Image (cartoon, helix red, strand yellow):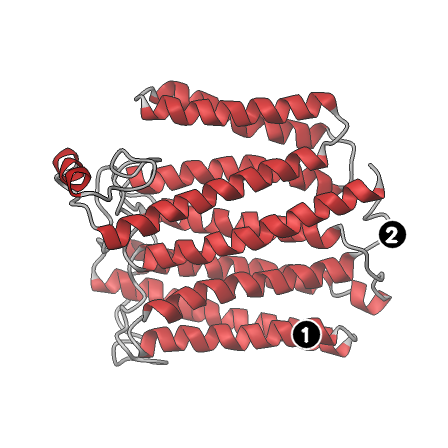
Amino acid sequence: MSAAAVRTTGRIAAVAALFAFVVIVFGAFVRLSNAGLSCPDWPTCYGKATWPGHEHEIARANEAFPERPFEDHKAWREQIHRMLAGTLGLLVFSLALSAVRGRRGAVLALIAAAAAAAIGVLAYMRGAAVLSSLLSAAAIGLPLAVAMRMRAPAPMRVAVAVFALIIFQAMLGMWTVTLLLKPIVVMGHLLGGLLTFALLAWVALSLRDGAPPTPMQQRMRPLVGLALAVVAVQIALGGWTSANYAALSCGIDFPKCAGHWWPWPDFREGFVLWRGIGVNYEGGVLDAAARIAIQLAHRIGALVTFIVAAWVGIAAWQRGLRALAVVVLVLLCAQVTLGILNVKLLLPLSIATAHNGVAALLLLSLIALLVRVSRSPQTRR
């Protein structure tokens, strides 16, 4: 692939990563404003491509879904989030096509995957669940097969694989609605969005020109990798906290919880990942002890994350990567501050949404640091 084609792929990846960040933040806004089930069907909203707007449409919607009366101030949020996610899917599809430019068989396979995904959605809307599942599986499998067979640098192969991930992410979005905000699905949807963002950012950063690291900087790779793993686990704990409505289970106490340093947590009940089908999890179903256990786990994770990420930031500063070090440390402190404010101010929507956005930016800063200490002359070949 020519240098110009590589630059084009990198630019598409950068735009897609930026758009993925927007989708993540807006998705957090939707979830935290309790609008996750404001459109009871998928991918339409009360049977419409947008959402009901006229009185007769609203009346028809309420008649069709009596268990979920239409709420205009929520429905538009959910459906716009779906539209943004669909646009991101088109960007990722363009990225995958750019990465396989000149490979006719790979291009046809990706087009077939896109067609299978689209037909799968139509089949689902017509009630053909089995056919829809088979088509979705094919849509996911084809890009993965192309990525595995490609003889190309890792960023190009990942650019193709992300197309499979975005299709699976769409399925998680569907299951979020159809399984009534099941916590494991809600958390998986959050992690899938952040993984999409992370991989797109890694592709974009890896395809940029840059100076190779010094030997001392290269030795930071295991530490940066550890920090990424710790941040990923902490984001998962945050997603589990949000999905189980456990953010305020300790009241406004910090660093204590419900007036105690170690109250009555029920970790066994709090971390049951799979519960019954057909239960509506909106508002949460766990008792106080289980929610306290989830909140305590998230707080302990925050302490571990702060120590490890601060260690990485200090190490980067000492090795001459001062700009990235400052970014990591500032975002880390901002994230901890936002987490405390969420508790003390009773989870205001703006701060809770910002908490999700800064988590994504902290992840991005560590990915940028990993690329910087891992760069080699072979990256662009």
Disc 2 marks a residue whose amino acid type is Pro
| Residue 73 in view in this figure | yes
Q: Judge whether 180 appears above or below 133 on screen.
A: below
Q: Residue at x 30, y 59 (%)?
A: 33
The x and y percentages for residue 125 are: 33, 26
Circle number at residue 276: none
Left or right of 183, for residue 334: right
Can the viewer see residue 272? no
Give percent across and percent down for residue 111.
60, 25
Name the residue beneath numbered marker 2. Answer: 377
Left of 277 or right of it: where is 148? right
Q: The C terminus appears in which quarter of the rendering?
A: top right
Please report the residue visible at 50 percent of the width from the left and 76 percent of the height from the top.
334
What is the total number of numbered labels drawn onto the structure image? 2
Q: Earlier in the sequence, mark 2 or mark 1?
A: 1
- Please state the horizontal and vertical placement of residue 139, each as a whole percent of the image: 53, 26
Q: Which residue is mark 1?
A: 325
Q: Element at badge 2?
A: loop
Q: Nearer the viewer, residue 308 or 252?
A: 252
Res. 165 image quadrant: top right
